[in-house]
Image (cartoon, helix red, strand yellow):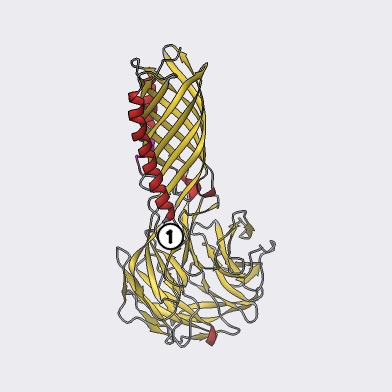
C-alpha cells in the first residue's frame, strides 16, 4: 500500500517537472550589464522587479566592453569591446541566464562605443570613435553571425557618443558632441545607411544620448552644457530631417541620457551631475515637455544611462559613480518611484540590455 | 580550477569509501549492533530561482547511506549522501545526524534531522570569470517508510526530506524524495 503510494508520489513529481530540463518562466526577463575590464553581468528581473544576479556572472567579453544588445530572439547577446575594437557574440542559456561566447570575435573600427539593433533583429549598427569616426552596419545571420553590409561604414565628421534608432527602424540618429550636432541616416532595406538631407543638424549647447518617441515624431536631445533638454521635430520632408521644435526645457546638471516610457507619454532624463532624475509629460501634438509634480526620484552617483523595461513597468539607471543599477517603477501618472531592488554591479556600468 | 580538483578528489574519496566498506560489512557475520546500508533513486526539487535561473530545477540522481538505526530504544544515527543532476547543474549532499525509528503494522517509520555539507556545481557556466562551484552548509529534516522484505533486505518505499542549502551565499529551500533497497547487517532490532 505504502509502496504504491510512494510510486505514485514519485511518478507525479517526475511528470510535473519535465525530466531533467527546466521550464523557462515567462514572468522573468534576463538583462545584461557591461562594464569594467571584460565584465558582462547577467541579471534576472522577475515580475515584481526583483533583481537576481545570474550564477556565473560576471561573464567574460573582450577588453573594454562599452555597449550591449540582446537580439529580439533572446538567443544572442552582442557586446562591443571598445579597447579591443571587436564585437563579441554570445549565446544565451534561457534557463540559467549564462552566456557563452562564440569565437572568433568580429573586428570593427578602432573604438566601438555604442550599438543598436532594429526590432526585427536583422541589422546591428555600431558607432565607432576611431580616427575615422563612422557607423558600421552588419546583417545578422540565423546563428547570430555578423556580416558587414555593403557600403558600410557611413562616415561621420567627429566621434559619436551614441546611436538612436526609431521604432520603425527607418531612421538612425547619431549624436556627435564635438560638433554639438546630430547626424541623421535613413536605414535602407539592406541595412546600409544614407545620410538624411541636411545632416548633420547642429544643436545648441551640446548633445548626449538621444531619445525618440515611439511614434517617431520627436527627438529629445540632452544638452549637457546648459542643463536642458531640446525637443526637435522629426520631419517627413526631407524624410528624417530635424526641425525646430517647442524649444529647450530645464533639466538637471549635465543631462546625459533620456528615454521615453513605451507609450511615449512621458520622458525621463538622467543627469550625470546630480542624483535625481527629471520626469516630464510629453505633449503628443507638439512635443512640449511639462515637468511632473511628483518628487524627483533619486539615483546613484553619476548616472550615465537610462533604459526602460520593454513591458513598460520599470526604468533602470546605470550609475557610474556608485557602480550600481537603480530600479524605478513607472506609476500610473507617469512618475517614477524608487524600488528596493537597486543593486551594486561591482564595476562601473556602461550599458544595459534587457531581453524582449 | 582548484575547486574542480578538490571536487574530483571528493568524488573519488566517496567512491573509495564505499569500496572499502562493502567488503568489510559483508565479511562480518554478526555486528554487535545492527547496521544498514541503503541506496536507490532520488529526486530533488531545487530552488534554482534563487541563483538567477528562470525557474526551479528538477534534478534526478541517487541517494544512499549508512545507519545504525537502533542504538538505544529506536534512536540511532544516519549518514546520508546523495547526488542529483540536471542539464544545468548538479548537487551533492553529505549529511549525518540523529534518527528515530519505530515499527508500525509491520513497517518501520523513521524521522531524522541531518546536517553537513552540500556541493553545487553549474554544468553550463557560460564564459565566466569564476568557477561556478560552491561547498556550503546543508540541513535536512525528514523521514520515511521501510517495508521489510526478508531478514536481510527491506524496501525503502519513500524517504522525504526538506533540504536547506546555502549555495553561492543564497538560501534554497528544496524537497528531496528517495526510494531504494536496504541491506541489514548484524542483529535485528527488537
The percent position of residue A113, horizontal first and vertical second, equals 46, 76
Q: Chain of mark 1?
A: B
Residue depicted at x 50% and y 85%? A201
Q: From the image, give the main secondary structure of the stretch colored magenta.
A: loop
Q: Is residue A256 above or below residue A59?
A: below
The percent position of residue A224, horizontal first and vertical second, equals 61, 79
Q: Is residue A1 above or below residue A292?
A: above
Of residues A54 and A203, the one nearer the viewer is A54
Of residues A351 and B133, the one nearer the viewer is B133
Where does the N terminus of chain B fall, quadrant-wise? Answer: bottom left
> What residue span does the magenta drawing correspond to?
A16-20
Residue position marked by numbered label 1 in the rendering: B128
Q: Judge left or right: residue A211 versus residue B90.
A: right
The percent position of residue B27, horizontal first and vertical second, equals 33, 24
Residue depicted at x 43% and y 64%? A60
Judged from the image, the secondary structure of the residue bearing numbered disc 1 is: loop
Residue depicted at x 58% and y 69%? A320
Residue depicted at x 35% and y 28%? B24
Q: Residues within 10 Å of mark 1 (few under 14, many from 20)?
A: many
Residue B25's image quarter? top left
Q: Is residue A49 above or below residue A170?
A: above
Of residues A140 and B100, the one nearer the viewer is B100
Q: Judge left or right: residue B183 versus residue B171.
A: left
- Let me know if residue A97 appears in the view: no
Whether the magenta-drawn stretch holds residue A70 is answered as: no
The percent position of residue A65, horizontal first and vertical second, equals 46, 70
- Let me know if residue A232 appears in the view: yes
In this rendering, the count of numbered labels is: 1
Amino acid at each position: 500500500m505504502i509502496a504504491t503510494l510512494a510510486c505514485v508520489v514519485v511518478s507525479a513529481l517526475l511528470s510535473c517537472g519535465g525530466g531533467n530540463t527546466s521550464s523557462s518562466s515567462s514572468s522573468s526577463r534576463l538583462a545584461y550589464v557591461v562594464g569594467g575590464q571584460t565584465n558582462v553581468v547577467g541579471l534576472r528581473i522577475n515580475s515584481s522587479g526583483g533583481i537576481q544576479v545570474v550564477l556565473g556572472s560576471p561573464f567574460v567579453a573582450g577588453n573594454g566592453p562599452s555597449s550591449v544588445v540582446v537580439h529580439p530572439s533572446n538567443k544572442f547577446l552582442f557586446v562591443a569591446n571598445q579597447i579591443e575594437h571587436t564585437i563579441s557574440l554570445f549565446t544565451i542559456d534561457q534557463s540559467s541566464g549564462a552566456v557563452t561566447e562564440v569565437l572568433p570575435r568580429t573586428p570593427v573600427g578602432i573604438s566601438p562605443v555604442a550599438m543598436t539593433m532594429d526590432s526585427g533583429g536583422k541589422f546591428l549598427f555600431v558607432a565607432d570613435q576611431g580616427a575615422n569616426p563612422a557607423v558600421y552596419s552588419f546583417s545578422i545571420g540565423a546563428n547570430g553571425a555578423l556580416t558587414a553590409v555593403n557600403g558600410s561604414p557611413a562616415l561621420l565628421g567627429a566621434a559619436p557618443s551614441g546611436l538612436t534608432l526609431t521604432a520603425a527602424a527607418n531612421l538612425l540618429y547619431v549624436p556627435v558632441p564635438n560638433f554639438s550636432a546630430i547626424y541623421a541616416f535613413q536605414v535602407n532595406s539592406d541595412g546600409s545607411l544614407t545620410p538624411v538631407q541636411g545632416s548633420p543638424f547642429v544643436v545648441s549647447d551640446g548633445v548626449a544620448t538621444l531619445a525618440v518617441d515611439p511614434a517617431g515624431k520627436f527627438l529629445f536631445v540632452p544638452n549637457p552644457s546648459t542643463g536642458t533638454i531640446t525637443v526637435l521635430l522629426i520631419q517627413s520632408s526631407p524624410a528624417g530631417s530635424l526641425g525646430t521644435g517647442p524649444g529647450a526645457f530645464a533639466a538637471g546638471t549635465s543631462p546625459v541620457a533620456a528615454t521615453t516610457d513605451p507609450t511615449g507619454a512621458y520622458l525621463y532624463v538622467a543627469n550625470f551631475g546630480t542624483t535625481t532624475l527629471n520626469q516630464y509629460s510629453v505633449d503628443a501634438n507638439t512635443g512640449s515637455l511639462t515637468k511632473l509634480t511628483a518628487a524627483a526620484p533619486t539615483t546613484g552617483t553619476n548616472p550615465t544611462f537610462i533604459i526602460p523595461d520593454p513591458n513598460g513597468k520599470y526604468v533602470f539607471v546605470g550609475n557610474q559613480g556608485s557602480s550600481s543599477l537603480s530600479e524605478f517603477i513607472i506609476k500610473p501618472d507617469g512618475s517614477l518611484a524608487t524600488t528596493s531592488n537597486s543593486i551594486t554591479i561591482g564595476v562601473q556600468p556602461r550599458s544595459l540590455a534587457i531581453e524582449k | 580550477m582548484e575547486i574542480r580538483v578538490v571536487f574530483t578528489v571528493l568524488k573519488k574519496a566517496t567512491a573509495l569509501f564505499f569500496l572499502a566498506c562493502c567488503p568489510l560489512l559483508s565479511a562480518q557475520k554478526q555486528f554487535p549492533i545492527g547496521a544498514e546500508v541503503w541506496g536507490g533513486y532520488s529526486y530533488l526539487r531545487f530552488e534554482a530561482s534563487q541563483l538567477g535561473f528562470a525557474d526551479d530545477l528538477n534534478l534526478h540522481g541517487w541517494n544512499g547511506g549508512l545507519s545504525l538505526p537502533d542504538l538505544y530504544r529506536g534512536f540511532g544515527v544516519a549518514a546520508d549522501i546523495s547526488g542529483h543532476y540536471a542539464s544545468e547543474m548538479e548537487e551533492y549532499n553529505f549529511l549525518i545526524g540523529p534518527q528515530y525509528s519505530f515499527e508500525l503494522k509491520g513497517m518501520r517509520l523513521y524521522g531524522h534531522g541531518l546536517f553537513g555539507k552540500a556541493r553545487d556545481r553549474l554544468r553550463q557556466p557560460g564564459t565566466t570569470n569564476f568557477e561556478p562551484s560552491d561547498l556550503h552548509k546543508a540541513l535536512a529534516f525528514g523521514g520515511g517508510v521501510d517495508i521489510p522484505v526478508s531478514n536481510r533486505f527491506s524496501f525503502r518505499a519513500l524517504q522525504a526530506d526538506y533540504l536547506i542549502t546555502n549555495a553561492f551565499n543564497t538560501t534554497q529551500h528544496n524537497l528531496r524524495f528517495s526510494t531504494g533497497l536496504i541491506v541489514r547487517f548484524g542483529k535485528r532490532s527488537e
